[in-house]
Image (spheres, rainbow, N blue to C red):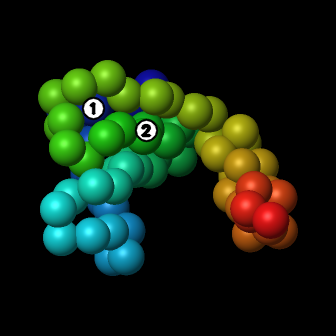
Amino acid sequence: MLDPSHARWRKSSRSDHQNNCVEVALTPAAVGVRDSKDATGPVLVFGAEAWAAFVAQVKAGRFDLP
């Protein structure tokens, strides 16, 4: 499982200078997601397969706004 205190957190290079972004921590088994403004706050953890399915849907435009 993901230990948030020892994870390597990364955020998008497209995030703004005010740190308004989410960060992800990738491991072979799980992916953590947190608010970059609250590094000690809650973390959502997804299985690697669920994350891969989500990323595929994002790339396919499934969540694009009209």
Marks 1/2 in contact by CB < 8 Å: the verdict is yes
* Rendered location of residue 43, percent (x, y): 37, 28
Tell me which label, 1 or 2, sits earlier in the chain: 1
| Rendered view: 49 above or below 43 | below
Q: Is residue 38 left or right of residue 21?
A: left
- The answer to which of 59 and 53 lies nearer the viewer is 59
Q: Considering the numbered disc 2 on the image, is that residue within a helix, a strand or a loop? A: strand
Residue in the picture at 57% in, 33% down: 46
Q: Nearer the viewer, residue 24 or 6?
A: 24
User: Real-space Cα distance between discs 1 and 2?
Assistant: 7 Å
Circle 1 residue: 4
Callout 2 environment at 10 Å: few (<14), some (14 to 19), or many (20+)? many
Residue 11 horizontal/vertical position (percent): 33, 61
Instruction: Specify the amino acid type for callout 1.
Output: Pro
Residue 42 in the figure: left or right of residue 5 = right
Say which element carries label 1.
Answer: helix
Quadrant in the rendering for residue 63: bottom right
